[in-house]
Image: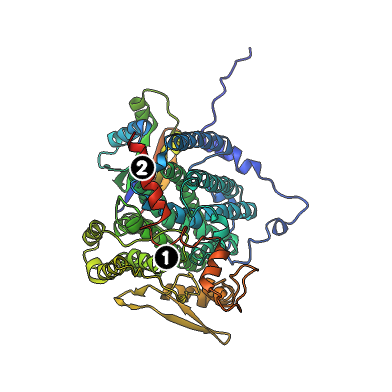
């Protein structure tokens, strides 16, 4: 088992995304660093459009993640509703 | 009665298919092998190109939209930083030397990556990877442009930025990153995808653009933060492309495994050697440090890279040949690299210094097993000599490793008091290497690496002087002539930070900025 992670620039928009990730991934751990925030989770992490929309209070297209994304690791599976990172081992 | 059917918006998968594979066509009057002439000679076997899919499913229309938004954000931050004299908000003008190294060493690589992906994107046999390579090619030229633009603000105030492109092709240590990319773009398309898509993006950019750029922000440099993070969000796609290519190649044919494994071994090692510069930037060039090189290596290489290799194990891929040594070296390389630049501080277009006492305390705490024992005494000795007016500058030229082109300064993996030397005989000549990794790479493709443009050899052969130089003149000074050829001004662009024009100007301007 390994961690997957995703990192964003630290700003108002990503605050909602981070909150949504924490709501949907109970094992996720947040790591704040200068100007960036990294979230680690064992094996898999899901970002749900509906949860991000609740946190932001506006419609959100998951491809908007590209705007504030810094980096990530793991296999990616993206649909309209979910963006999932996972390892397959 | 006609019913009006509400047109359903295409889902991500369908849109991706329409905008990539559906743009492809089967040639009717040309042979595929004539259209894609480079696909066969590396020995990689691909049976079905349609199996490749970009998991981001990004299409060109979405790409323009999000890239435009990223670009607007980035230039807004850069403009605000420049308008507000942001360069005076950095912790210390020593920091700016890291940017000089970045501008000469990294930005030209972004441009080479642009060229490489434009070429390979034309040569791959499937529409999916061609579209992904097109986006990456555009990303890379954007990175080189935004980096040059961000750092142009510093060029108005500080020395050493003015000839970065000229210097990239000439200055001795810049042959290290340059030769890395020259090696990659002269390989076949599949090797290029493994070298840059995998080794450079996964191994190198995460360590450069994440902890170092977070460190740049920590030191008050919002301009470098903006281009760094904006670039790395593209790199997340690039890493994915590299990884998907490796998986795709391995799934296509079992015969591909040994070829890919050899490339992974080679390019991990080559990428790791280039990272030496980043190790030194993090431990020695950030006045306010965010994490040590060792911690960054543990997070981004050992943990994340380790997860990646554990994942690729199901295809039969093993960790790269040099992995164990690289993990041992994390306690050493930044100190050995900074000591080398301190030595050769007269011949590099940026300033160097010995770490202050508080910086050495930080290094001792981060490197409890090595710093005090092996490296602190050397820096203390040099600091003492400098205080006595005898700042040490090495006036001889070092032997270089034929593969990575780094001076032979690295030590044996299990003995940090012994310099590592390896050699190979080829066609009646002896070639020298810094490590088993570099020797292994040479021995597999000697005809490629014997052609390396080795800066030290070229200087000794007299190929690094301006046309006006007269080596037979009685007062001929080779170092001064080489610096002229580099377009460096002696005493302004080089030597110790202490007493430099940059140091004095920064202090004077900052004093003006905080007083009436």
Q: Quadrant of residue B394?
A: bottom left
- Where residue B377 sits, quadrant-wise, is bottom left
Q: Position of residue B53 (x, y in %)?
A: 53, 47
Question: Circle 1 sits in a helix, a strand or a loop, which is it?
Answer: loop
**At 54% from the left edge and 25% from the top edge, which residue is drawn?**
B8
In the rendering, at what x and y percent does residue B70 appear? 48, 36
Residue at mark 2: B510
Subunit of label 1? B
Q: Residue at x 36, y 42 (%)?
A: B510
Q: Are marks 2 and 1 in contact (CB under 8 Å)?
A: no
Disc sitting over residue B345 in the figure: 1
State how many labels appear. Answer: 2
Using residue B343 as the reference point, say whether residue B144 is left or right of it: right
Identity of the residue furthest to the right in this view: B29
Q: Residues within 10 Å of mark 1 (few under 14, many from 20)?
A: many
Give the quadrant of the N terminus of chain B.
Answer: top right
Count residues near mark 2 (Cα–Cα under 10 Å), then give few for <14, some for 14-19, many for 20+: few
Can you see residue B77?
Answer: yes
Please state, as top left, top right, bottom left or bottom right, where the C terminus of chain B lies in the image. top left
Q: Is residue B63 above or below residue B278?
A: above
Q: CA distance from mark 2 to mark 1?
A: 26 Å
Tell which subunit mark 2 falls on.
Answer: B
Q: Position of residue B238 (x, y in %)?
A: 49, 49
Q: Nearer the viewer, mark 2 or mark 1?
A: 2
Residue beneath the point at 27% across and 70% down: B381
Q: Position of residue B265 (x, y in %)?
A: 45, 67
Q: Residue at x 47, y 58 (%)?
A: B493
> Which residue appears farthest toward the top when viewing the image?
B1
Left or right: where does residue B112 sit relative to residue B326?
right
Question: Closest to the observer: B290 or B339?
Answer: B339
Please name whichever residue, B188 or B472, is drawn nearer the observer in this view of the structure: B472
Q: Earlier in the sequence, mark 2 or mark 1?
A: 1
């Amino acid at each position: 088992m390994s961690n997957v992670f995703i990192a964003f620039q630290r700003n108002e928009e990503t605050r909602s995304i981070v909150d949504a990730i924490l709501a949907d991934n109970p094992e996720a751990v947040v790591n704040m660093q200068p100007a960036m925030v990294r979230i680690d989770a064992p094996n898999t992490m899901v970002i749900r459009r509906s949860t991000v929309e609740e946190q932001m209070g506006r419609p959100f297209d998951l491809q908007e993640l590209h705007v504030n994304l810094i980096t990530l690791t793991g296999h990616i599976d993206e649909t309209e509703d979910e963006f999932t990172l996972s390892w397959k081992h | 009665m006609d019913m009006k059917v509400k047109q359903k918006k295409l889902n991500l998968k369908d849109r991706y298919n329409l905008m990539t594979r559906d743009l492809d066509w089967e040639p009717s009057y040309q042979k595929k092998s004539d259209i894609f002439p480079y696909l066969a000679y590396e020995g990689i076997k691909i049976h079905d190109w349609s199996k490749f899919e970009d998991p981001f499913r990004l299409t060109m229309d979405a790409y323009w939209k999000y890239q435009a938004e990223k670009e607007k954000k980035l230039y807004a931050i850069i403009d605000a930083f420049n308008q507000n004299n942001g360069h005076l908000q950095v912790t210390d003008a020593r920091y700016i030397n890291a940017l000089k190294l970045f501008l000469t060493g990294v930005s030209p690589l972004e441009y080479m990556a642009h060229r490489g992906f434009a070429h390979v994107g034309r040569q791959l046999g499937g529409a999916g990877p061609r579209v992904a390579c097109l986006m990456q090619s555009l990303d890379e030229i954007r990175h080189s442009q935004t980096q040059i633009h961000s750092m142009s603000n510093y060029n108005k105030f500080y020395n050493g930025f003015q000839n970065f492109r000229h210097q990239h092709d000439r200055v001795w240590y810049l042959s290290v990153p340059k030769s890395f990319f020259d090696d990659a773009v002269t390989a076949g398309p599949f090797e290029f995808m493994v070298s840059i898509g995998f080794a450079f993006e996964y191994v190198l950019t995460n360590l450069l653009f994440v902890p170092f750029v977070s460190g740049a922000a920590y030191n008050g440099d919002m301009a470098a933060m903006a281009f760094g993070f904006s670039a790395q969000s593209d790199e997340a796609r690039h890493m994915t492309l590299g990884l998907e290519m490796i998986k795709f190649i391995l799934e296509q044919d079992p015969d591909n495994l040994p070829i890919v494994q050899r490339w992974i071994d080679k390019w991990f090692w080559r990428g790791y050697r280039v990272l030496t510069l980043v190790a030194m930037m993090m431990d020695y060039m950030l006045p306010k440090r965010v994490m040590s090189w060792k911690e960054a290596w543990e997070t981004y290489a050992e943990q994340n890279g380790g997860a990646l290799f554990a994942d690729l194990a199901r295809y039969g891929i093993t960790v790269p040949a040099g992995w164990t040594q690289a993990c041992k070296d994390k306690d050493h390389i930044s100190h050995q690299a900074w000591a080398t630049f301190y030595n050769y501080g007269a011949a590099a277009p940026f300033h160097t210094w010995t770490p202050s006492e508080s910086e050495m305390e930080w290094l001792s705490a981060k490197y409890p097993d090595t710093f005090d024992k092996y490296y602190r005494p050397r820096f203390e000795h040099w600091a003492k000599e400098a205080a006595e007016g005898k700042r040490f500058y090495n006036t001889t030229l070092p032997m270089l490793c034929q593969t990575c082109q780094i001076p032979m300064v690295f030590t044996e993996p299990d003995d940090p008091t012994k310099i590592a030397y390896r050699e190979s005989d080829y066609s009646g000549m002896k070639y020298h290497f810094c490590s088993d990794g570099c020797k292994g790479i040479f021995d597999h493709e000697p005809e490629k690496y014997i052609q390396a443009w080795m800066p030290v050899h070229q200087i000794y052969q007299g190929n690094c002087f301006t046309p006006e130089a007269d080596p037979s003149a009685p007062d001929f000074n080779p170092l001064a002539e080489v610096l002229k050829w580099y377009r460096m001004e002696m005493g302004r662009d080089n030597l110790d930070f202490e007493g430099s024009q940059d140091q004095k100007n920064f202090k004077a301007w900052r004093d003006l900025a905080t007083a009436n």
